Amino acid sequence: MSTSLSVFTSDLRLSDNPVLRGATRSAERVVPLFVVDRGLAGTGFAVPNRVAFLADALADLDAGLRERGGRLVVRRGDAVAEVLRAARQADADEVHIAGGVSGYATRREQRLRAALEADGRRLRVHGAVVTAVEPGEVTPTGKDHFAVFTPYFRAWLQAGPRNALTAPRTVSVPSGLRSEPVAAVASLAPGSPSPGLPEGGETAGRRRVRSWWRSGLGSYADRQDDLAGDATSRLSPYLHFGCLSPVELVHRAREAGGAGADAFVRQLAWRDFHHQVLAARPDAAHADYRPRGDRWRHDEAEVAAWKAGRTGYPLVDAGMRQLRHEGWMHNRARLLVASFLTKTLYQDWRIGARHFLDLLVDGDLANNQLNWQWAAGTGTDTRPNRVLNPLAQARRFDPDGAYVRRWVPELAEVTGSGVHTPWRLPKAERDRLDYPGPIVDLQEGLARFRDARE
């Protein structure tokens, strides 16, 4: 009987999975394989929050395969060596895997192709698995990628996603293949995850979709920036790990229709936009996409205060504390805290990007790094010197202070909009609060940034 390998990476799902479908269609038997890759230790991926979510996702994937007569085969070691070993043991002619855009994924694919071809086997790389539209599928005339979102979005809409695929009804796995327990993934990152971490896996992701589709999709266009309302989809972790298909979500949103669905589709396109930028410019993960000649300041005390949520600006601090508790942060808060670090404090964006990757369960290299560059003005933003004022942002997106009171309990008893400016409270009241004063004057920070950039 013919056999193929379906190597799971960032596509931990059964529904609309071209990798698994490709493997099941090309052979009578399939080895669903996940490698606990020791090479990830040097990439920054293996942190407690993402590893905990990954463990959930793998357990759910294994359960889904068992319902279809199969199982997940887990190996631990070098990804290329373990895939080749499994292919030999199963006598598999083909190995199927999703395409990636990070430098690590690209190098892994190159090594894997060379190793398999030298062994008389074929590698099949599938596109539009992690994204709705494959990076490089739409390009401007004479260039390899779009550097501005709006024209990319127009081309993206015209291209449209491929058709969604159903999950296979049965998965026949060869007997006798050894497997590590799914829990072996915990060895990637010892340590405790954030207490508010969501449950991982396709089952949990689809449950979240059903719930939010009923309660949040219709109003998304109006409420996506409402910090206290918490009206965003919270699907980003499931998209990052491939527990949900962006192709399927685009189709479902278009079927639902309306302003909320249109706004949601636009956010999925932003995700694809960053992937196509990183695919074309892999060094943008660490180097300025558009250098501005910045001479970043180095103030460890300021960075420490920012990380701890003790800057003295309540909306900034609320976002940073949500990140630490949930391994996730509202998108509006992400923009604000990034602007505050890179422009108000004028600290290197890479410091913030690394801190986010240390904690975010949805810590995707393309979206994290390029959103940080957007906020710092070194990326694709067409207004690179814009600065988000935390007080103006508070008036617009947390006018009653509910978001701040939730995440900065020291200020929970401060009434009204004064919660955003505790330094203006009467001295006796201010002295009772275990909360610092502002670490920087906003106008001084703005002037310093403008002087440096100009």
Image (cartoon, rainbow, N blue to C red):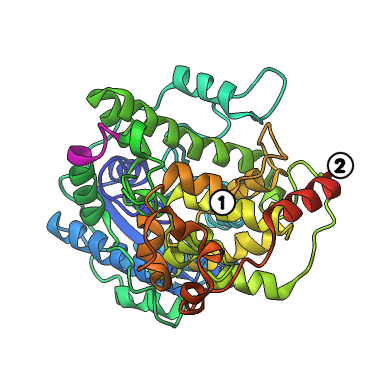
Pinpoint residue 165: horizontal percent, then vertical percent.
Answer: 27, 35
Q: Relative to 395, is 285 on the left or the right?
A: right
> How far apart are labels 1 and 2 at the CA level?
23 Å
Q: Report the quarter where the C terminus lies.
A: top right
Q: Which residue is painted at 65% across and 30% down in the image?
A: 145
Q: Quadrant of residue 193?
A: bottom left
In the figure, 280 relative to 113: above or below? above
Q: Which residue is painted at 57% across and 46% down in the image?
A: 101
Marked residue nearer the N-terminal end (1 or 2):
1
Please tell me whether mark 1 sits on a helix, a strand or a loop.
helix
In the figure, 221 relative to 17: above or below? above
Q: Is residue 216 magenta?
A: yes
Q: Is residue 248 magenta?
A: no
In the figure, 203 relative to 396: above or below? below
Pinpoint residue 391: horizontal percent, then vertical percent.
Answer: 55, 50
Specify the amino acid type for callout 2.
Glu
Q: Mark 1 points at which residue?
A: 390
Q: Nearer the viewer, residue 9 or 262?
A: 262
In the figure, 126 relative to 11: above or below? above
- What's the mark number on residue 454? 2
- Magenta segment, which residues? 213-219
